[in-house]
Image: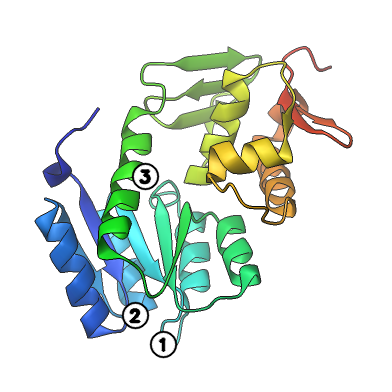
Amino acid sequence: MQTSSMKNRILVVDDEPDVLDLVTYNLGQAGFQTDTAADGAEALRKARSNTPDLILLDLMLPEMDGLEVCKLLRRDAKTSAIPIIMLTARASEIDRIVGLELGAADYVPKPFSPRELVLRVKKRLEQSNSAAPGHAYSFGPLQVDVSRHLVTVRGRRVDLTATEFKLLVMLLQRIGHVQSRDQLLRDVWEYETNIDTRTVDTHIRRLREKLGVAAKYLDTVRGVGYRFSPEMP
């Protein structure tokens, strides 16, 4: 596991110079390397060329908003697994839900505490760097190598978002045990409050679509939640 923040590069995307200065200063004080972008097009270009370890993405950007940037990042195999923390002044719950459904790992409302933001960045990076190192799973056509963040079905790579991958691994680690939607929200999204459980359903649906023939292992327990069942026909 990486223990030095110096090895981690953060892309900070915001059109407000004061916010960029505040965030990059505090990340720099914590030992992180930073890169910045002031709009969506620049963010996409830098994310694809520099491959940061994490992206702090403002929701309200000129011309192309943060949700659209997040969507495009998740569609690109090169950037699909990069954790994204969204920053926004919008207080609407629907914006948070949409962001999470698009694959954002976390959501921080403005104004925010720089110290709390740095702690959230560290926590997300620790999770990415230490998620069950060395573990691999194999069930029929499905192969999951956790340490390499690699999923294949019948030998073909499946590109999952960071959240989709974490959801799949969480179910794999609890094979045969039913996980309620609320439990998955707490363990995968780490939200203790009640956000719409449709967020889980949306991610399960997208995960099934991507896994194809291996989707048969994702079992729906009606009225309860989901489980990974290798004995499914």
Q: On the rendered structure, is 214 left or right of 88?
A: right
Residue 141 point in image, percent of width and height: 64, 20
Residue that lies at the very extreme toward the bottom in this rendered image: 63
Numbered tag placed on residue 124 in the rendering: 3
The answer to which image quadrant residue 126 occupies is top left
For the C terminus, give its image quadrant. Answer: top right
Residue 20 point in image, percent of width and height: 23, 75
Classify 10 Å Cα crowding around label 1: few (below 14), some (14-19), many (20 and above).
Answer: few
Residue at 63 percent of width and 14 percent of height: 139
- The amino acid at mark 1 is Pro
Q: Earlier in the sequence, mark 1 or mark 3?
A: 1
- Above or below, comparing residue 75 to residue 226 in the picture: below
Q: On the rendered structure, is 68 left or right of 38?
A: right
- The amino acid at mark 3 is Arg
Q: On the rendered structure, is 51 left or right of 90?
A: left
For the N terminus, give its image quadrant. Answer: top left
Label 2: element kind:
loop
Residue 51 point in image, percent of width and height: 28, 53
Quote the CA–CA distance across marks 1 and 3.
27 Å
Residue at 52 percent of width and 37 percent of height: 165
Residue at 10 percent of width and 57 percent of height: 29
Q: Which residue is mark 1?
A: 62
Q: Which residue is mark 2?
A: 39
Label tally: 3
